[in-house]
Structures are given as C-alpha cells and as structure tokens.
Amino acid sequence: MLKNLHVALFLALCCAQSHFLYAQGAPESCPRPLPGSAVTEPENLRSRKGVLKVELTAHNAKLSDGSTRYCYIDQNGAESPTLRVNPGDLVVLTLKNDLTTFAPDAMPIAHQHVHADTEKNGNSCASDLMTRESTNLHFHGLTIPPVCHQDDVLHTSIQPGEPPFEYRFRIPENEPPGLYWYHPHIHGFTKEQVLGGASGAIIVEGIERADKAIAGLPERVLIIRDQDLLNPNAPPSKSDPVVPKMLFDRDGDAANTGTGFGKPAKDLSINFVPVPYPDYPPAVIEMKPEKQELWRVLNASGITYLNLEVLFGHTPQPLGLVAMDGVPLNENGLPADFVDWQTHLGVPPGARVEFIVKAPPEGASGLLVTRTVDTGTGGENDPNRAMATITASKDASDPASELAASPAPLPPSPMPWLGSVLPVRIRKLYFSEKLLDPNNPNSATEFYLTVDGQTPAQFDPKSGVPNIIAKQGTVEDWIIENRSNELHAFHIHQLHFVLLNYRGTPVKEPFLRDTVNVPYYEGKALEYPSVRLRMDFRDPNTVGDFVYHCHLLEHEDGGMMGLIRVEP
Ligand SMILES: [Cu+2]
C-alpha cells in the first residue's frame, strides 16, 4: 500500500518503464480490438436464483503512445461484462483495485485531492484518500441507497493492494427494466479512468414486459466510449471540408468549429473498437437481412455528445425508441406497446437509448453515424462521423441474447406519474464557469453548479455540508440554468426526473431521464437558457447524501457538482 506521495512518486519513476514493457508484452492487459473490427458484445453475467455474483478487478496499462487504458476484468477473464439482473435480485460484487502508478503527467488537480490519512487507510468506506490510483463504483441510474457498500461515491475509495471491496445491494422490485451502467466516481480522477475505458452495462431484465412491440427481438448492447485522439496531429481527411483554424477550449480539447467537421475533441469507440480521426474507419455490425433488433446503446463517453442516426445510402432510417435512461416509454400512460419512431436520437454523456433497428436487405449495407452536436462556442467539437457499417447476411450470427417472445405484462406502477404530482417547491440552480485570470482566456477554468442565492464554489468532497436538503416522499421542480457558453449535461444520482420545459418550450415526454442537456448561453438573450425538471424523491431509497453534477467528466472533476441530503 502506498503510504505517501513520495513512495508513489518513487514507484512511478522507477517502475514506469517496466510497466510500459508489461503492457506491450502482455496482451491481456486491457486488450482492445483494431479499428475496422467486427463489433462483439461484452460477456453477459446473469443472476442465478436471485443472486448475481461478480468479481471485478480494475486494471490499467500504459501504452507506448502515452495513453493509459483502464478496464474491469471479471472472474472469467472477460473485460467490462454486462451485468444482467432481475428486479428484486441481490447483487454481490467485489472490486479489487489493481491500478498501477504511472509517471505523473500534467494534471494539477491531482495534488489538490491527495490527503494521505494513514489512520483512515484500510477503511474504504470512510477514506480521505482519493488519488489517481484510487477507485470505486457508481451504479448510474439505479434507485439504490447512497450508502457504503451500495452506491456511495462521497467517501468510498478503494486503494491498490487492499483486499477486494464488497458491494452488496438489492435491485428494487420497482426498478424500471432497461439499460443502466457502472463506472468509477473518484472526485478529480473520474475522467481519466472513464476515458481509459472503465465502464460497463447493467441490464434490468424484462423490458419486453413493458412494451410487447419488442417481444422476441434479439437485443444488442452497444457501448460508445471516447478516448484521447489516436492521431492528434493529423489534418482532416480529404473528404472532410477543410476547417480553417484549430481552436482549443480551456480544457485543451478541440473547440467547437460550428461547421460539423474538423478535429473532434475525442475519438470514439464502439464496444471498444476504435473509430479514430481523421478517416473514421467504421467498425462492423453484422445482422441478418431485414431482421429487427433492439439496440441498447449507452453513451459512456467522458465528454462526447452523440446524435445517432442509421443511414441506408443517404436516407435516415426509422429508429423505434422504446426506452430512455433505463425507463420504458409507456410509463406515462401511453397507449400500450407504444414506439416513438425517430430518425435520430440525441444521447448526452451518461445517457442511454433503447430502440428498434431493422437490418438492410441481403447484400446491402447501412451506416451507424453520429451527427454533429452544437455544443456552443466554449464547447468541444463533436463533428459528424461514421461509427459502424451495418452489413446484412443470412450467415450473420444473432446477438447473444433475445427478449422473451410472450412476456407477462408489467403491472402498472402503484405511484402516480411523476409529471402529474404537485411539487412542494421550486428551486433554481445554474451552471457557470470562471477564468482564474479574467484577462487571460487560456487560464484555468473553475466550473460551478450553484443553487441560486448561494456563493458559487467548486465542489469540495470534504465539506459534507449539503447545498440542498429535500424530504423523502416529496417531489420538487428544479430549474437548471446555463450561464456559460457551452452545453452541459445535468445528472443526479439515485433518482430519475421528468423534463417539463426545455428552453422555454413545454415538453411532454413519455419517459423519465437521469441525464439531460442544458442548452448554452449565446450572450445575447435577456434570460439564460434553462430546463425545468420534476425531481422524484418519493422512493425511500433516495434517503441520504448524494450528488448532482455535470456529466462532462472534466467539468465534474473540476468541481461542477453539488451535494444533496434527502431526509427521511
Ligand atoms: Cu459540463
């Protein structure tokens, strides 16, 4: 165990080279497919007799290009398995921290959060030690209690060399069936670990019970991650309109060009198959001709917004949305078995979409792309790009999992629809950013998420003083404003909300979300753009202290986060 920084630094300096050789010589250390590979699904770990036992080890590996990969290896040696559970199941998951100290790179934030407290070392539930090599898990979207060994990220920190740490929680009986996910949440270092690949899917089974339109369909899990550019110095490809000037935002990512083209802030991968800038060689998804599948897509990116589209030739294909952020569409008293047919689907970092896709005819092919996302002048460049070619062949193998063909319908929720419950209060919060040196546009930025009336401050994991106190059993309306010139993605742990108003326009969405875009300020309008959300504190599992934050991880790590206490 590393007792102090000096030891850590010594190990880093003395051993970096040998670990580099290890990563090169040991393909089992977070192996990744080559660009252009076929997209294979993660291994499925299914619960048995109401219990899912998982043993994960967090690994990392430093590559010759200077990048660091992170991965979870399970008890079978598989990487980032999909955890499949039923409502009511018990999850017993051990996490062993096998992260290695590599030579430090330029991330000044590292030093703000290292407070080696030897007395607390060894107690992962009350650790003051959150370093680059610490890790823990957040179960994004699940309504489970924010307490140690379940879903606490405020104090739970597991250090390298400690015995495996046990997570033990029950999936609520009323958890909506759908797609959730797990990832580390160490304040100050989440971005590095998630960009490196530390993430995986969780599926609460039974989505076909909520919507018979998808009964019997093969289901395919697609995890889209982002990572540092493999070819950062390459000019745009010849088929990409030349973009005159490369700008960087204050985080060092390629700034939004406003053109839909140019160098992206990050490369994307799909089930770990990289699709690197500048030529974006697509990965390959093989389907049976004209067969319908349910695609369960997670945006596990650190900072990249997606806007997914499937093209046959130049024609966008219908995508039948059946669930958002793990919640099936007909939770809002829609006609039974409703499908919302769209031609493109926006997915902020952290969000999930589940939709029906039909394969092209035999011999033809399609293309899964992400359209450009306008993230504002201060935002990252998320250009148009191909992600995967969809081929159709009778010999294509079906996905590993298929939804039940004649499911028993889900019983209706005993709770009234969130959108029709009266809120006990309205709160206003706002995203803002401040240059440390107002005269220097390239100086470091502080990121804030502030309750209106309080003083803007970067999140301090040690403060313990809640910014918001709510009562379990109630429902509140939160207006989230954006006073910065870049898009942010608001996320709250432990619960879902319903979007009521987007930028002044009332919306009536038939599903809940746990992550939502908050549009950027252009500096002209009299009012800041905002969203209005109805927050659901009715579930007893929301009692406790937890966080809300921007899901762009460099903003989250930079302090764009707040603490809420839900009292019983
Ligand atoms: Cu943000």
Image (cartoon, grey):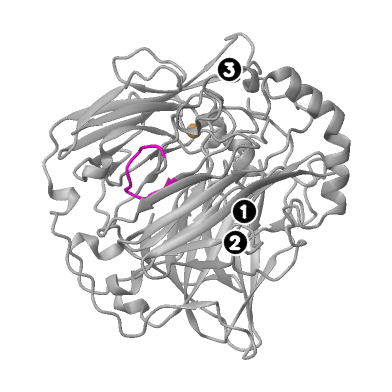
Magenta portion: prevailing SS class: loop
How far is the residue under mark 2 from the one under mark 3? Answer: 44 Å
Do labels 1 and 2 touch, CB within 8 Å?
yes
Left or right for 475, reference 176:
left
Check the image and report above or below for 330 versus 466. below
Q: Position of residue 559 (x, y in %)?
A: 49, 24
Q: Amino acid at mark 2?
A: Val
Q: Residues within 10 Å of mark 3 (few under 14, many from 20)?
A: some
Q: Amino acid at mark 1?
A: Asn
The quarter of the image holding the C terminus is: top left
Left or right for 175, reference 55:
left
How far is the residue under mark 1 from the one under mark 3? Answer: 43 Å
Q: Position of residue 132 (x, y in %)?
A: 64, 30
How far is the residue under mark 1 from the one under mark 2? Answer: 7 Å
Residue behind mark 1: 384
Q: Tell me the element at label 3.
A: loop
Left or right for 436, reference 280:
left
For residue 297, say whether it is visible: yes
Residue behind mark 2: 369
Check the image and report above or below for 91 versus 60. below
Q: Tell me the element at label 2.
A: strand
Q: Amino acid at mark 3?
A: His
Q: Which residue lies at the image location 36% right of the left edge and 46% below the top edge?
A: 514
Dividing the picture into quarters, in which one does residue 489 lie? top left
Residue 141: say if magenta. yes
Q: Which residue lies at the image location 45% right of the left edge and 24% below the top edge?
A: 523
Q: Which mark is residue 115?
A: 3
Task: Please name which of the two marks, 2 or 3, marks the residue nearer to the observer.
Answer: 3
The quarter of the image holding the N terminus is: top right
Q: Which residues are magenta?
A: 139-148
Q: Nearer the viewer, residue 524 or 450?
A: 450
